[in-house]
Image (tube, grey):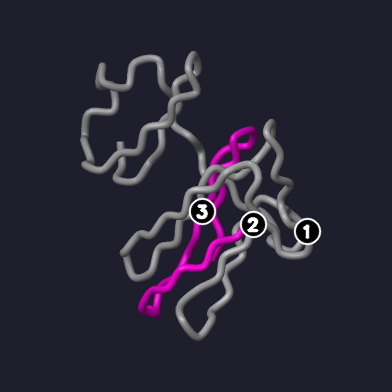
Amino acid sequence: MKKFDFYKCNETNMLVEIFKESDNDNSDCLKGMELVEVKNADSTVEKHVPYIEEIDEGYFVSVGKETKHPMTEGHYIEFIELTVDERKYRHYLLPTDEPVAKFFVEKGKQVSAREYCNLHGLWYGN
């Protein structure tokens, strides 16, 4: 288990994030859960990849560059997460929200984002 990995319960869809690493990957703590693999694709085509734009006050993240991800009751982005020089910030969304987030944070050298789609899982972009 690695820090910031997500595990999902196949029965309940509960999502768990790891905050402390462990060398014991066979722990009973995560019995019935599987690692959520992080996906990435061409950000100009794939509507799941978070696209980061630097703005005066920090960063603007949209899910999808040319076409934004749909937001409906059955298919939506649950959260957008921004990492700036190892500091994490998260914005939670509702199905009625637009799939974007503004993060009013100090700018950094290493910037990346992740988002979680309720149907298609965890996606990464930088």
Secondary structure type for disc 1: loop
**Distance from the alpha carbon under mark 1 to that under mark 3:** 16 Å
Please give the range of residues in magenta. Answer: 100-126
How crowded pointer 2 is (Cα within 10 Å; few <14, some 14-19, many 20+) is rated as many
**Distance from the alpha carbon under mark 2 to that under mark 1:** 8 Å
How crowded pointer 3 is (Cα within 10 Å; few <14, some 14-19, many 20+) is rated as many
Q: Is residue 72 above or below residue 53?
A: above
Which residue bears the numbered disc 2?
63
**In the rendered structure, which amino acid carries the disc numbered 2?**
Val
Q: Is residue 22 above or below residue 61?
A: above
**Distance from the alpha carbon under mark 2 to that under mark 3:** 8 Å
In the image, 73 versus 81, the foreground residue is: 73
- Spot occupied by residue 100 in the image (x, y as percentages of width and height): 60, 60
In the rendered structure, which disc, 2 or 3, sits on the residue that comes first in sequence?
2
Which residue bears the numbered disc 1?
67
**In the rendered structure, which amino acid carries the disc numbered 1?**
Thr
In the image, 89 versus 72, the foreground residue is: 72
In the rendered structure, which disc, 1 or 3, sits on the residue that comes first in sequence?
1
Secondary structure type for disc 3: strand
How crowded pointer 1 is (Cα within 10 Å; few <14, some 14-19, many 20+) is rated as some
Mark 2–mark 3 contact, CB under 8 Å?
A: yes
Q: Which residue reaches farthest bottom?
A: 56
Image quadrant where residue 110 sits: bottom left
Q: Tell me which residue sits at (57%, 38%) in the image.
A: 121
Residue 103 located within the stretch drawn in magenta? yes
Q: Tell me which residue sits at (42%, 55%) in the image.
A: 90
Which residue bears the numbered disc 3?
80
